Image: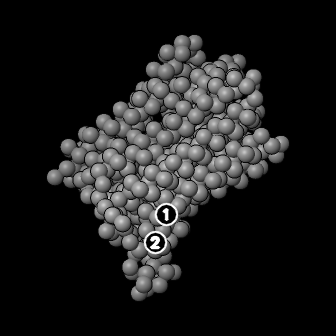
Amino acid sequence: MNRPERRNPWAWIPSLYFAEGLPYIVVMQVSGILYKRLGMSNADITFYTAWLGIPWIIKPLWAPIVDMVRTKRLWIVSLQLVIGIVLAAVALTIPVSFFFSVTLVLFMLVAFISATHDIAADGFYMLGLAGHEQAAFVGVRSTFYRVAMVTGQGIFVIIAGLLETSTGGNVPFAWSVTFGILALMFAGFFVYHRFMLPYPPSDVRVRAVQSSGAVPEFFKIFLEFLRKPGIGYILAYLLLYRFAEAQLIKLVGPFLLDPRTKGGLGLSTTELGFVYGTVGITALTLGGLLGGFVIPRRGLKFWLWPMVVIMHLPDLVFVYLSQVQPGSFFLINVAVAVEQFGYGFGWTAYMLFMIMVSEGEHKTAHYAICTGIMALGLVLPQAFSGALQEWLGYPNFYLWVMLSTIPGFIVTALITIDRDFARKP
């Protein structure tokens, strides 16, 4: 059997990171839209769905196992098949009377499987590309991850909305069909990546385990991470950089869906999907690709502050939308496009910082630790964001979001970036 050690990165990076991002957005965002359409309150939605992020927080606990057992390639293709099976189970249980408890358990299962898939995929990215290629494709990687997220809360929400309309408002049936389509997509990912992922020579078990034993190696990996220079500032950056965005993204769907009498914009399910599935995806793609294009030319250190500013300041558009409640659907789309472009551009710096911090023998496990800490920084503010919004109302809530950007600027000033990191030689 021909096992190519290398393939054109365009043949697998876009699809791999699309497959990585889709279950995350389904669990963390689409589930909230589903529950909103089924009549749950904002406080309940944000509280319960925020804790679905726990697997992405604690995934560093089993990240070394992915290093120790078989190959990253095998983990990737196997887990994509399992995700498809569990999503099919979600589709079958949405119409039942006890849907909430069952779907919540299934979403948690998808979260654990997806978090493990993230570990393998991120490690495979670093093993399958040279250093300058990692920097060059980080924009592509982040873009298609975000494309998946926007597709989940855009294209698939549009599908659900159209099905709601065509079935006379049968919300459970519409969303059941939507999740069935998602399940079929992951069956397709399994087949495609089974044949299209390369076989990097470095994609092997961590050999140190054979001499030292699994348990000592497990703790050694964590200790190596905690001994990194400036670890306190690193942890603060990973936790607080997205403090504002964490709260904002959790309430975007409810804000756009809620009627104007409750402070929202009163969009339909289909209109909500259109905003994120067309205009949003275009703006975010351009932002992510631009970030990946410019960083290799001057390095991360040069672009860090411009990216921090461009990521955070566009949150102001939600202050405007909540205060004015414009009736123009075009204006709403423009506002969302501005925010999504800034998010796509600024996110590139955050991803490259995690790659820089993860350099070393156990880069897969260390990157998983970084993303786990990042997830913790999302879950905690998201868990109280719905209750905070209901207390403050949408206009004051988005003013609070702008105040919440301040920690992101502070922690950026504290970190140290290698002068030539991510600069193309």
Q: Which mark is residue 386?
A: none
Q: Secondary structure at mark 2?
A: loop
Which residue appears at 21% of the width and 53% of the height?
420
Label 2 sits on residue: 70
Which residue appears at 42% of the width and 42% of the height?
144
**Relative depth, front residue between 371 and 272:** 272
Residue 82 position (above or below residue 172): below
Amino acid carrying label 2: it is Arg
**Residue 99 seen by the camera:** yes
**Residue 397 seen by the camera:** no
Which residue appears at 33% of the width and 69% of the height?
202
**Quadrant (top left, top right, bottom left, bottom right) of the N terminus:** bottom left
Amino acid carrying label 1: it is Trp
Give residue 301's position: percent from left, percent from top: 26, 48
Contact between marks 1 and 2 (CB within 8 A): the answer is yes
Looking at marks 1 and 2 on the same chain, the residue that comes earlier in the sequence is marked by: 2
Few, some or many C-alpha atoms within 10 Å of disc 1 (few <14, some 14-19, many ≥20)? some
Few, some or many C-alpha atoms within 10 Å of disc 2 (few <14, some 14-19, many ≥20)? some
Residue 221 position (above or below residue 123): below
Give residue 170's position: percent from left, percent from top: 75, 29
Q: Which mark is residue 75?
A: 1
Give residue 326's position: percent from left, percent from top: 56, 14
